[in-house]
Image (cartoon, rainbow, N blue to C red):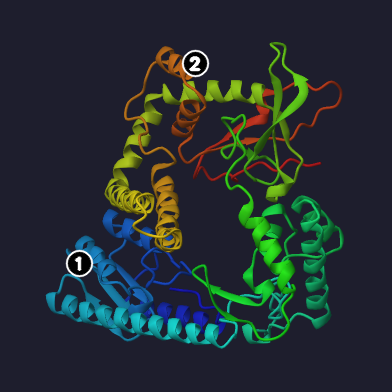
Amino acid sequence: MPETGELEKIDTQWADNRKVIDRVGACLGEELSDGLSAWKRSVRRPGWQRLLERVESGESDGIVVWHTDRLFRQPRDLEKLIELGERGFKVYSAHGERDLADPDDRFIMRIEVAHAARSSDDTSRRIKRRFATFREQGRPTGGPRTFGFPGKDQTWKPGHGQTKADQPLVPADLVAHERQAIRDAAADILTGVSIREIARRWNEAGLRTAAGREWVQVTVRETLKRSTLGGVIEHEGKPVGRLAGEPVLDQRTYERLRALFAGRKRGRVAGERYIGTGILRCGVCNTKLSAHAQAPQTYPDGTTRATYFCNKDRRGCGRVYADVRSVDRELRIFTLKRLSDSRHAAAISAARSQVAERLAEVNEEIARCESLQRALSERLGSRQITLDAFDAANEPLAADLAKLTAERKSLSGGNPEGPTEAQSVETLDAQWTAGGYAEKRAMLISALGRDRLVIKRYEQNGKRMFDKDRVKHIEADDGRPDIEVQAG
């Protein structure tokens, strides 16, 4: 059931559902709630996936929903449940019941779901048109407050008896303070001050994001890149209107700042890459670790010493550091041991088979998106389309690819080609030794699966010696916390 934020309504729906369970003499198995719309095609609903698993395994022979449109707004979802529950599965609600084994009930439910899908499509169309009108009139289209603009206080928490309707506006003097901070930052950046320095200044001044979080480089950059600072309303990268009132930045400053950001190279700076970055996690705050070289410090063989660390610029705590070479030695031992274990290989194979159907669909969709991108690139290269037309067509493809790639990683545990049988330690060791950064990283991801590796904080006094026990393997779904929080 989607959580709309209307707390009374949700509680009432849960109460009605429990009354239905009592009335039909059923037993409550699990209460599932995604807080996500059943209409959005691209949204993966964990509660819905859990329901399908329970139906397929025989753990559940029915579900109670407040109304069928809380569960279904896409016909394909209903068909998936019908396929699994055709031997007998009942959908109860406060308004009646349907048996998926009954052809008449299936027919009626198909009509209800088709009507719900049409209703959602109509609502979406009306909302899009209303937002387009707002943009043309220079009015905000809704959404949470952004830094430097008035709106509801996103850090507010409802007290006893309060609802979303009681959420207050942020004080006008805070908005004025934020707008001045933006103007000062824009002027400083145009004279060469770094974004890191702006983040530091804002944090020291007690300024926070609209959501109440400390500033890091990426949030400062994205804030200063917003077209609304110059009073411009953009939609899908195109200016479509102007905001009413005085803009935060004057026209000249706004244009110079946008040009500065547009002229900067994108992507990662070329340099050394490390096996554990983005995989290892901080044992204090659970943030993914970064790595950097420690020049002029060197290892005995003359190569530059490097360190894995919890990066404050990525909202980390900054309290965990570990020598790259020492940690990588432990990663190698872990990888060889895990991949040579026949039980692990069997578990990976079983997990892959469970998600094989959806994984194949995702891979096909990724291939289609990539094929369209290649075709667009060829047309751009032969000057059949303009760069603006390419950007407009490529942007939704890139967004879809990002979502699909994330889903593929979730389904596959990060490595779609994981092991189906164990290999010998000698074979794996040869692969590791001969492999480069990408090969070692792929082996580690395959060995790790859905588990985690964390680096615990160094706690000893005296001369620093690497303790291999600081690299801790946390198994998924083993009933323990995801990480061990180290004191101090």
Tell me which label, 2 or 1, sits earlier in the chain. 1
Q: In the rendered image, which residue does mark 2 sit on?
A: 433
| Image quadrant occupied by the N terminus | bottom left
Q: Is residue 201 above or below residue 127?
A: above
Number of numbered discs present?
2
Relative to 178, 418 lies left or right = left
Q: Nearer the viewer, mark 2 or mark 1?
A: 2
370 or 279: which is nearer to us?
370
- Relative image position of residue 234 (x, y in whole percent): 55, 73
Q: In the rendered image, which residue does mark 1 sit on?
A: 88
Relative to 488, 235 lies left or right = left
Note whether residue 9 is visible.
Answer: yes
| Image quadrant occupied by the C terminus | top right
Note whether residue 19 is visible.
Answer: no
262 or 107: which is nearer to us?
262
Q: Is residue 396 above or below residue 475?
A: below
| Marks 2 & 1, CB-CB < 8 Å contact | no
Relative to 178, 146 lies left or right = left
Name the residue rendered at 46%, 31% in the picture: 442
233 or 77: which is nearer to us?
233
Q: The disc labelled 1 sits on which kind of residue?
A: Gly
Name the residue rendered at 41%, 86% in the picture: 126
In the figure, residue 83 lies in which quadrant?
bottom left
In the figure, residue 304 lies in which quadrant?
top right
- Relative image position of residue 21 (x, y in whole percent): 37, 76
Q: The disc labelled 2 sits on which kind of residue?
A: Thr
Q: Is residue 161 above or below residue 336?
A: below
Question: Which mark identifies residue 308?
Answer: none
- Relative image position of residue 58 (x, y in whole percent): 27, 57
Name the residue rendered at 67%, 54% in the picture: 218
- Relative image position of residue 301 (x, y in whole percent): 69, 11
Q: Is residue 4 above or below residue 466?
A: below
